[in-house]
Image: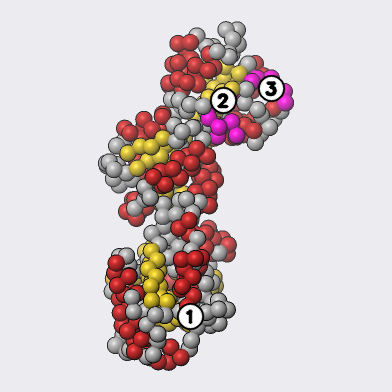
């Protein structure tokens, strides 16, 4: 058996966008990922489904696994031939005990690499509008841990204060009063600006800003809790002026995106641009079906109806496999919603008719007025497509053929882990996504869990599972984003 390797990867402070490109690349090829408690859920969602996940997180006095056992486990797994990613919050060499772990690996003769991460104390300050240094306030930065191998040893506040510049205390929330008092007793001006930032870069980020003599009460008043970082220095006075995160329309919102993996990223990224922590948790995937003979007769159809962007993609995959040139197809195209219309446009096709309502009855009503009695309508869609459309077409006397170009398969995922973390909304763009999500969840009841659905048909499925449902105004991804922004604004 060939020996494996260990990558010591810094996950950054929490926001998945702050994971480095190399960190993301290494994560994608891992066999096993051992992760800490401070790794953000967004980063955890990037772990391949094929990789084994091991939680070795430590919070205060609650240690999932002793440090020595973690180091030995990494060495053992690598010697068994596994590619192991050791995922640590922030940067692994900044109070992350990464050096201790690599020492064990080196002693065992295990190959390893260190992948730096964005340091939490600098990134979290930036998300709070606090520059680490500023020519008007501080020309140096000093990062101090409140926890050492000698827990009873008090920090030398006089020496720390003599350093000047911006002071940053890691893992010190429980010692906040001692730190503030210690600095004041050492000669610091009680009016020196100070800040406590909790759960930095995450939607739940909390900024408690005051001065040294008032920071303890301010932190208590705002409900500060670990993980937190303490900042002391004039730069903290800029937080109110330079804070930008809170101004984003979806700041503080957490959402799960359940679209098929090929489509999830565009929606999730649009939400992130607006400040949302969006987790991609695809619950379905599309698989091409053998529909060759029906697709081969595409030149005989007068109209082709598409009911989803995935349906568009699958149709053109069939055409490509059969070597059919779309320029030889004389049929007119019809689509449900702007997203399906946009998907057609990406292939150079203009939709002759687009139904604004995402339901079969409305689509059938519009098609019945366009498809003439001597014409044939082909519906290219999933095998599990709702009968609402075909039943309505039959009632209208429309001559149609229903072509199952693909089937929707359920994708198992760690739904329970993400639901436990707490989310504001789960976004569904199809009824099959709702069904698959429910099947993957350990919960039997979804009462009180908020779902944002792309249309009434999807909403009906979600209601059947007990979700509290909101529906986008139009059947499009853009409309779902707009609806979430509106919902976020109404709760502020």
How far across and down, in percent of the image, does residue 374 sit?
60, 7
Residue 465 part of the magenta-drawn span: no
- Classify mark 3: residues with Cα within 10 Å, few (<14), some (14-19) or many (20+): some
Q: Are marks 1 and 2 in contact (CB under 8 Å)?
A: no
Q: Nearer the viewer, mark 3 or mark 1?
A: 1
| Residue occupying the point 41% across, 29% down | 456
Along the viewing direction, whichever of 34 and 419 lies nearer the viewer:
419
Question: What's the distance in space between the residues labelled 3 and 1, CA to CA?
Answer: 68 Å
Residue 468 to residue 86: above or below: above
Along the viewing direction, whichever of 198 and 13 lies nearer the viewer:
198
The disc at residue 329 is 3
How far across and down, in percent of the image, does residue 363 sit?
50, 21
Q: Does label 3 or label 1 sit earlier along the sequence?
A: 1
**Residue 409 visible (yes or no):** no
Determine which residue is flagged by label 1. 166
| Residue occupying the point 52% across, 79% down | 137
The disc at residue 354 is 2
Q: Secondary structure at mark 1?
A: strand
Q: Is residue 469 left or right of residue 13?
A: left
Magenta stretch bounds? 327-342
How far across and down, in percent of the image, does residue 132 sit?
51, 75
């Amino acid at each position: 058996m060939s020996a494996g390797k260990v990558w010591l990867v810094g996950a950054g402070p929490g926001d998945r966008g702050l994971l480095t490109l190399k960190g993301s690349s290494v994560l994608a090829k891992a066999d096993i990922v051992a992760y800490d408690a401070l790794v953000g859920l967004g980063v955890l969602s990037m772990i391949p489904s094929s990789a084994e996940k091991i939680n070795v997180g430590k919070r205060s006095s609650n240690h999932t696994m002793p440090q020595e056992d973690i180091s030995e486990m990494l060495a053992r797994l690598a010697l068994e031939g596994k590619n192991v990613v050791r995922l640590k919050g922030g940067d692994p060499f900044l109070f992350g005990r990464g050096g201790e772990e690599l020492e064990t690996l080196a002693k065992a003769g295990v190959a390893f690499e260190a992948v730096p991460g964005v340091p939490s104390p600098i990134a979290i300050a930036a998300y709070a509008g606090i520059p680490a240094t500023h020519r008007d306030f501080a020309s140096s930065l000093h990062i101090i841990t409140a926890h050492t191998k000698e827990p009873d040893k008090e920090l030398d506040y006089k020496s720390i204060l003599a350093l000047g510049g911006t002071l940053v205390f890691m893992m010190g929330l429980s010692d906040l009063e001692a730190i503030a008092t210690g600095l004041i007793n050492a000669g610091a001006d009680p009016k020196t600006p100070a800040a406590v930032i909790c759960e930095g870069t995450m939607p739940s980020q909390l900024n408690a800003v005051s001065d040294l003599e008032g920071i303890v009460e301010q932190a208590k008043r705002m409900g500060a809790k670990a993980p937190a970082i303490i900042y002391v220095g004039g730069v903290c006075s800029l937080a109110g002026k330079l804070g930008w995160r809170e101004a984003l329309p979806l700041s503080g919102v957490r959402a799960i995106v359940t679209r098929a993996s090929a489509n999830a990223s565009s929606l999730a990224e649009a939400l992130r641009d607006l400040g949302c922590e969006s987790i991609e948790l695809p619950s379905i995937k599309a698989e091409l079906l053998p529909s060759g003979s029906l697709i081969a007769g595409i030149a005989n159809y007068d109209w082709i109806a598409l009911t989803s962007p995935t349906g568009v993609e699958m149709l053109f995959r069939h055409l490509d496999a059969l070597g059919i040139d779309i320029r030889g197809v004389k049929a007119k195209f019809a689509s449900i919603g702007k997203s399906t219309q946009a998907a057609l446009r990406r292939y150079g096709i203009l939709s002759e008719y687009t139904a604004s309502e995402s339901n079969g009855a409305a689509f059938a009503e519009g098609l019945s007025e366009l498809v003439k009695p001597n014409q044939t309508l082909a519906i290219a869609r999933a095998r599990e497509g709702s009968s609402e459309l075909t039943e309505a077409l039959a009632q209208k006397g429309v001559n149609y053929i229903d072509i199952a170009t693909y089937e929707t398969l359920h994708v198992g995922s760690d739904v329970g882990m993400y639901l436990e973390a707490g989310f504001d909304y789960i976004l569904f763009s199809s009824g099959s996504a709702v069904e698959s999500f429910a099947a993957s969840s350990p919960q039997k009841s979804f009462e009180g869990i908020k779902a944002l659905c792309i249309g009434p048909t999807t909403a009906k499925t979600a209601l059947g599972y007990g979700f509290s449902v909101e529906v986008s105004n139009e059947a499009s991804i853009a409309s779902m984003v707009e609806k979430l922004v509106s919902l976020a604004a109404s709760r502020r």
